[in-house]
Amino acid sequence: MAVIDIHTHGLGGFDTRSTQPEHLIRIAQMHGSKGVSEIVLALYPSPINLMRSQMNNIRTAMRMQQDSDPQSSEKQARIIGVYLEGPYLNPAKAGSLNSICFLEPTKHSLDDLIKGFEDIVKIITVAPELDGAKDLIKEITAKGISVNMGHSDATYRQAEAGYRAGAKGVTHLFNAMRGIHHREPGLAGFGLMHDDIYVELIADPFHLDIDIIKMVLKIKNRGRIILVSDSIKESSCGHGFAKVSDAYDRLLGGAMTVTESAEHLKEKIGLSDEDIERFTQINPCRYLYGDCKQ
């Protein structure tokens, strides 16, 4: 069964902002060298024309892989689509993203953004509390594209409304969202407590305290947990792991591939091989395809 990373921006000096599809192939090769079988390449919020250019670049890289020699000894993860991390996000929870490029949720801007790319766009992150977000979530899901909620200051009830509108998951649980308060559980509380919503976990040593991960494993339906790398250009593909952050110690991306994250959790908390298979293979496959027979 395929090991799938549904959320990676880049790795080892390359990312999805590159204008050269060969650079995207290098990202796939580096993930493949770590035992990852399939990747969904994530785009940063940018002007619409730039995001469309990047999607076209990803499509070119996907075609290059399809046309490549199947007997090639170069192991690489198959690029299976695009993840739009925005631009329909809350500036109050931008994290390391450029909020200047965030947009209000409208059908018109969605059409401008993804028209002609509906076949490769797999996931779009939306902040469900924004005006127009519920209608946009319905519009996106009607196109067969999955919606995650994230980069959001949503309350529990606003998150619930987003789920009822069709949202399927939560982007990197706890990161760049309203946290849990004893009088307001927020989006993080909704993601943790609701049995049917999928949650992404960045399980490197920096994004989530190990005891928070233990809490997630005690509470959350294990059939809805997906390990993601959220790796970026600055994430290392060598030996050893360093925090990927800026001069203000703000996290910019993940430090490990999903296979390395799984091994990290196996070492630190004794995560079982069964759970590793769930979190890196079965669950992301079911999230993307509805089953795990792909």
Image: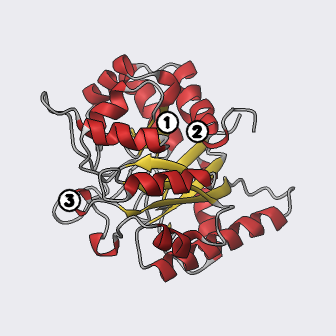
Residue 200: give x, y in percent of width and height. 43, 40
Q: Nearer the viewer, mark 2 or mark 1?
A: 2
The residue under label 3 is 92
At x 30%, y 42%, the residue is 158
**Residue situated in front as seen by the camera: 1 or 112:** 112
Read off the residue under disc 2: 287
> Which of the two discs, 1 and 3, labels the residue nearer the N terminus?
3
- In which quadrant will I find the N terminus? top right
- Which residue position holds label 1? 226
Query: Of callouts 2 and 1, which one flags the residue occurring earlier in the amino acid sequence?
Result: 1
Q: Can residue 208 be seen in this view?
A: no
- Can residue 65 be spotted in the picture? yes
Q: How crowded is mark 2: few (under 14 residues within 10 Å), some or many (20 or more)?
A: many
Q: Is residue 179 above or below residue 7?
A: above
Q: Residue 163: which quarter of the image?
A: top left
> What percent of the width, then of the height, locates residue 96?
28, 62
Towards the viewer: 172 or 106: 106
Query: How is the structure coloured here?
Result: secondary structure
Q: What residue type is labelled 2?
A: Tyr
**Mark 1 or mark 3, which is nearer to you?**
3
Mark 2 vs 1: CB contact within 8 A: yes
The residue sitting at 62% across, 56% down in the picture is 143
Identify the image quadrant of the C terminus: top right
Residue at disc 2, secondary structure: helix
Residue depicted at 43% across the width and 67% down the height: 106
